[in-house]
Image (cartoon, rainbow, N blue to C red):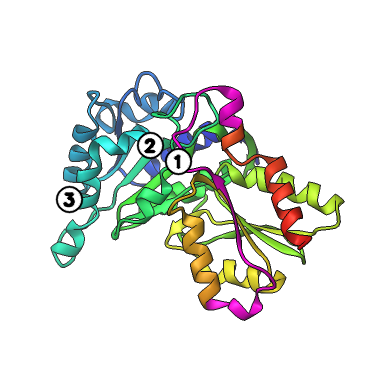
Amino acid sequence: MAELTYREAIARGIAQEMRRDRNVLLLGEDVAEAGGVFKGTVGLLDEFGPVRVRDTPISEQAILGAAMGAAMTGLVPIAEIMFSDFFAVCWDIVVNEIAKSRYMTNGQVSFPLVIRAGNGGGLRFGAQHSQSVENWAMAVPGLKVVVPSNPRDVVGLMAAAVRDPDPVIFLEQKALYSTKGEVPDGEIVDTLGSAKVLRQGGDATIVTLGTMVPRSLAAAEQLALAGVDCTVVDVRSLVPLDTRTILAAVSATGRLFTVEENPRLCGWGAELVSIATEECFFDLDGPPVRITTPHIPLPAADTLEDLAIPSVERIAATVQKAMEK
């Protein structure tokens, strides 16, 4: 068992899959000699060489065009888009080509590729480099979307993503890069579409994702001191979505709270609330509540950014207030 940072776990997860399969390759801006702008690919060039670990021009279209072609011809590319905000530059390739070509060729062409991106706020990078875009990706048929919240899940979900025959958007939460966690020795392989119950409680269910997972767990501890015992579910995978685990937790407590970093309008929590009200309406003891970032460009100023993104205190206060009604 080793203690790794989130960014070290990224390199370990990629290396695990590159050792297993010689067809796996990594490409992106500064992923080779520099070890990634967020230092998530350190050491991979030394181990696997410049043929399999490739720096690219500063062109998101070129990165994903090359990845798409590689996947179509039998390779398994892992492509890095430095900031998830930059999906806006190459979204046509993702949405109209990568996501749809397997379907449009009746399965004759497969797309086993992973697109990694630094996602979310909390580091004062401003509105153009701090967006949480998982709601963009999950709206596109043909894409799978995963968001790990801890180093162990980074390794396991990376393996699952690389081994999947479909394109996977792998969103790495920038605010978590320096966080640490224990990662077991040996090969780790998870299953896409599997949520995890991280805390059991009988009063309310908090369903959360990415950076909001540790904040929700901390809020649950505060709430326990106030007499509100919460279950906390880490969604981990938005597409496919583990509705069975999530709905079982909601039915058991009768209360649902979603905690999302993405902007409120059309966020993933809205879809989850819709599913819950359709599937377990009569198990609910109160209206579901969404705790989100407002529908605004994320500020760069530290106090304003902290105010916009759900904090431990806001999560706890919102749940406490709703439970008192």
Marks 3 and 2, the one that precedes in the sequence: 3
Please tell me which residue is depicted at 57% across the width and 38% down the height of the picture.
309
The residue stretch that appears in magenta: 279-306
Please say if the residues under marks 1 and 2 sit with CB atoms less than 8 Å apart: yes
Residue placed furthest toward the bottom = 282
Sort mark 2 into few (<14), some (14-19) or many (20+) by Cα contacts within 10 Å.
many
Hey, what amino acid is under mark 1? Ser
**Looking at the picture, how far across and down is residue 125, in whole percent?**
47, 24
SS for callout 2: helix
Reply yes or no: does residue 293 show up in magenta. Answer: yes
Q: CA distance from mark 3 to mark 1?
A: 29 Å
Location of mark 2 (residue) = 84
Quadrant of the rendering where the N terminus is positioned: top right
From this view, report whether residue 10 is shown above or below residue 137.
above
Residue nearest the observer in this picture, 76 or 279: 279
Please say if the residues under marks 3 and 1 sit with CB atoms less than 8 Å apart: no
Q: Which mark is residue 3?
A: none
From this view, report whether residue 161 is shown above or below residue 301.
below
Location of mark 1 (residue) = 132
Hey, what amino acid is under mark 2? Ser
Left of 87 or right of it: where is 217? right
Q: Which mark is residue 72?
A: 3
Q: CA distance from mark 3 to mark 2?
A: 24 Å
Marks 3 and 1, the one that precedes in the sequence: 3
Please tell me which residue is depicted at 66% across the width and 43% down the height of the picture.
215
Quadrant of the rendered structure where residue 56 is?
top left
